[in-house]
């Protein structure tokens, strides 16, 4: 189980190969990659800055992996989340889950992203033609998390 | 008792504070997140707006998300921030 918060980019192919390394019991690897879009809520976005709460961030990402492990048969999981200044088209987040069968990896990957969106302490600030502004949290993200009935 | 406070994102910018050490007086009544917010809100307009206004504020104690009624203990690390927007 790996959690990394970093300013640098990541290579999903490399991370998948690391996850699979020396194991023959993995039947499925599911990956999710989040990207910076150049348009959000009708505003052109020229730059995105991500702030986080060092210490709590890593801990909350570890908790999400631990929770996924109690709910599905996961062999391994990885979360990489970038912070700092990003441009449209840049990768923000990578979630990898390996399991014996695809059902567990698909479900766990989606669960982990829904949890991350609403519980992990990251904040996005967008640069638009009207200036910089903090991104507002979306109710649809809360609803997505509620599907999993997480107590909080 | 002494606590360490952190502010993030919009709160950090508006309050112009990222962290502070705070001494809380023992009033006989236990300190909670809500009591601390109300205490800090008395510092002035922007503090009231940020902590007790219309904006949603989330709190963490020792790196765990907590509700307004969570108790605060000596040595705790308390953080206030807007709803999260990562991913």
Image (cartoon, coloured by chain):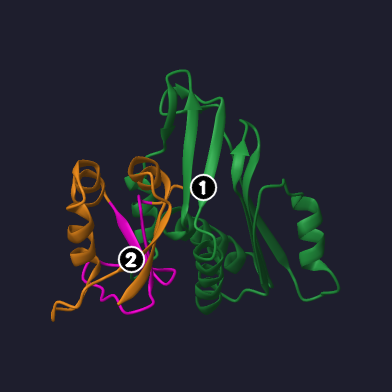
Chain colours: A green, B orange
Circles 2 and 1 on the same subunit: no
* Residue placed under numbered mark 1 in the picture: A51
Q: Quadrant of residue A9?
A: top right
Q: Which residue does the image show at 18% across and 46% down from the upper left?
A: B53
> Which label was assigned to residue B22?
2
Q: Position of residue A19 (x, y in %)?
A: 76, 66
Residue B68 higher or lower than A83, as above or below: below
Q: Position of residue A95 (x, y in %)?
A: 62, 57
Q: Say left or right for A81 vs B78.
A: right
- Residue A144 visible in the snapshot: yes
Q: Position of residue A55 (x, y in %)?
A: 54, 65
Q: Quadrant of residue B3?
A: bottom left
Farthest residue in the top direction? A129
- Residue A150 visible in the snapshot: no
Q: Which residue does the image show at 39% across and 59% down from the upper left?
A: B20
Q: Quadrant of the C terminus of chain A?
A: bottom left
**Chain letter for the residue marked with disc 2 in the picture:** B
Residue B77, magenta (yes or no): yes
Q: Say left or right for A114 vs B36.
A: right
Q: Position of residue A16 (x, y in %)?
A: 76, 59
Q: Quadrant of the N terminus of chain A?
A: bottom right
Q: Nearer the viewer, residue A44 or B76?
A: B76
The local crowd at label 1, few if under 14, some if 14 to 19, many if 20 or more residues have their Cα within 10 Å, is some
Q: Which residue does the image show at 19% across and 60% down from the upper left?
A: B39
Residue A99 higher or lower than A140, as above or below: below
Numbered range of the magenta stretch? B57-83
Residue B6, magenta (yes or no): no
Dot 1: element? strand
Q: Nearer the viewer, residue B62 or A74?
A: B62
Farthest residue in the left direction? B28
Dot 2: element? strand
């Amino acid at each position: 189980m790996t959690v990394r918060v970093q300013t640098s980019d990541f290579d999903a192919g490399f991370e998948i190969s690391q996850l699979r390394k020396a194991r023959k019991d993995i039947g499925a690897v599911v990956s999710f990659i989040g990207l910076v879009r150049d348009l959000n809520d009708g505003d052109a976005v020229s730059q995105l800055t991500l702030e986080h709460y060092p210490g709590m961030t890593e801990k909350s990402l570890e908790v999400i992996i631990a929770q996924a492990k109690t709910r599905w048969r996961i062999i391994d999981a990885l979360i990489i989340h970038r912070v700092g200044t990003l441009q449209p088209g840049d990768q923000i987040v990578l979630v990898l889950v390996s399991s014996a069968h695809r059902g567990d990896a698909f479900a766990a990957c989606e669960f982990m992203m829904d949890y991350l969106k609403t519980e992990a302490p990251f904040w996005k600030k967008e640069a638009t033609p009207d200036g910089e502004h903090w991104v507002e949290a979306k109710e649809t993200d809360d609803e997505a998390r509620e599907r999993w009935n997480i107590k909080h | 008792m002494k606590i360490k406070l952190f502010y993030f994102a919009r709160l950090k910018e508006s309050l112009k504070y990222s962290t502070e050490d705070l001494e809380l007086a023992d009033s006989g009544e236990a300190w909670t997140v809500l009591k601390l917010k109300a205490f800090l809100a008395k510092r002035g307009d922007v503090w009231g707006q940020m902590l007790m206004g219309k904006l949603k504020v989330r709190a963490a104690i020792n790196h765990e998300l907590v509700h307004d009624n969570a108790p605060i203990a000596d040595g705790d690390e308390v953080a206030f921030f807007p709803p999260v927007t990562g991913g």
